[in-house]
Amino acid sequence: MQVVEIRLCHRYFRRMEAPQDDTAGTEQASAPSFLSRRRKKTQVEGEAKPSRNLRPLRMIYAEAAKYPTQVVLAFVALVITAAATLAIPAGFKLVIDRGFAAGGDPADIARWFRYLLMIVGVLALGTALRFYFVSWLGERVVADIRLKVQRNLLRLAPGFYEENSPKEISSRMTSDTTLIEQVVGTTVSVALRNSLMAIGGTIYLFWLAPQMTIGLALVIPAIVIPITVFGRRLRNVSRTSQDRVADVGAMVTEVLGAMKIVQAFNQENREADRFGVAVEKTFTVAKRRILIRAVMTSIIILLIFGSITLLMWRGANGVASGEISGGTIFAFVVVGGLVAGAFGSLTEVYGDLLRGAGAASRLNELLEEEPTVTVPERPLALPVPPRGNLSFRNVTFRYPTRPETAALKDFTLEIEPGETVAIVGPSGAGKSTIFQLAERFYDPQAGSIRLDGVPLTSADPADIRQRFALVPQDGVLFSADARDNLRYGNWQASDEDIWEAARAANAERFLRELPDGLDTFLGESGTRLSGGQQQRVAIARALLRDAPILLLDEATSALDAESERLVQQALDRLMENRTTLVIAHRLATVRAADRIVVMEEGRIVEQGTHAELSVAGGLYSHLASLQFTAGEAA
């Protein structure tokens, strides 16, 4: 009995010190995301906070309901285990009252112990079945939710990820789903089992000893009230302690991530002192938490064990006077401990359900998020074969995160099939926005964009993007082998096609020198390759795409001279017989373009060839003189 109560105290303390708010388990973004702003708006409009109601759990119940067989089997096993648990004290009562007290006949005692063994066997089997089916449901529901959330995330336009931290979204996919797995795989099962045990045990206690049960009911409020008061204080201090620990962790991450800067500026001692201050603050808060927990422990032990002692004293007097049997008092004490444990677990379970409801609410926000760029009800088919014509007509566009500033203003540009157009201008001129709109990651607020004569808003975004091949400024690679990174542009490409593209991209040599060839794992984000090698893999990927329109976004800006030469050779091959748009800050790379478009503050200010613009005396001439003069001086 003592072990049971100590275990209850320990579980209660764990619950008190666990994060209680609805944002537990998620990383905080540096600025409020759209999702967090939407939660605040919902709360202002009068709906209950996710952390204060269980309605978001309906999503979990709906997912679990897809597997009715497992749900029914888990519930049956749960009922069996709850009944078997309560039957064990009753079996001991029979052993004491009808076995030992009836003369101690070995055969009679053996009969009642066989009854006990049968109950234990049923309990063991039921527990195994309950654990299997409940755990199966938890894993299956979490897997289904992750799949649904990921599918929806892949539908959302890039603008969504500008407004929302990918780290926060990733945390929801991991920490929040872990909470949901706990709810389905443990919490709900514990709640149902303890509810059955609490109800069944209370009925049995009244049947065993009504007066003692009434006394037990009167004692419970005297125990619960002080625990609740201290528990609130412990939760608040524990939350503050967790914040201090998080501060320490953030400081460690920041300093270790910038260790070269710290040591280069000889700031080791200052950072050590700053870390020491943070650690001492953490220790100060921890001392308060320890003190509250120590006082609370003594009060809980005094109240719980004092109450049990008084009840057992009353029961012993009843046994001495012949009012109740020894088996009855034994069964009463054991069942009373089970009932107390059940009620204690229910309070803990409610907190877990609230945290699970908060996690479900956050994931449900991701599931309900609708893409801003949608497929028309009746999308127009793009012409076949593709021509590679792209036109912008009076386009005005503002990013959702910067609605006060127009990235493009009344922008008009006609790009003919097979033409190479370079787009130059200072940072913030709107160059990258053209690429974003061309692939329909966004829709403009005014004007129209047409691909081979078809308005982009009337076509399926997937069909539009099939007509483009992109080589970004940084050769974005994935944590996979070389083969999968290369065929990302065309997943059906054969090894022969891959090697042909690698050869054209000046990537064949270093790819063949990799330890396992195309099967070599390239590391996280392709970190096992140099910058130039990553860029040539990105070019080979674009070659395999074999799209009629090529988008080059500063494809050689971060490379050394030799890597730039190799990459430029590969780009020249890639640009053959394709419509090409090139964004460039380094004007030397766009001299050979058919046309150079000069942009400033979202507008076209000049157009022409390099020779024409160099003598025009405009912005291009100014930029060219700065770069080429600096290059000659270098």
Image (tube, rainbow, N blue to C red):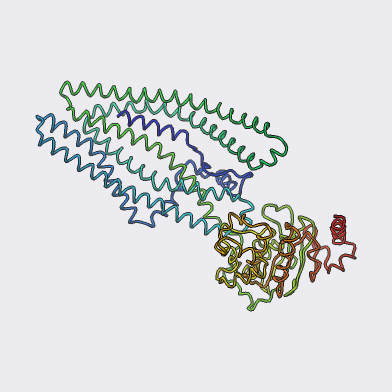
* Residue 578: % across, % down: 70, 73
Left or right of 516, for residue 129: left
Please tell me which residue is depicted at 90% across the width and 65% down the height of the picture.
615
Res. 334 image quadrant: top left
Left or right of 309, for residue 428: right
Res. 562 image quadrant: bottom right
581 or 380: nearer the eye? Answer: 581
Left or right of 14, for residue 435: right
Please tell me which residue is depicted at 64% across the width and 56% down the height of the picture.
159
Q: Report whether residue 458 is seen.
A: no
Please tell me which residue is depicted at 57% across the width and 71% down the height of the picture.
378
595 or 507: nearer the eye? Answer: 507
* Residue 203: % across, % down: 25, 36
Q: Report whether residue 31 is seen.
A: yes
* Above or below, comparing residue 291 to residue 346 in the picture: above
* Above or below, comparing residue 297 to residue 430 in the picture: above
Please tell me which residue is depicted at 30% across the width and 52% down the height of the picture.
73
* Residue 235: % across, % down: 49, 32
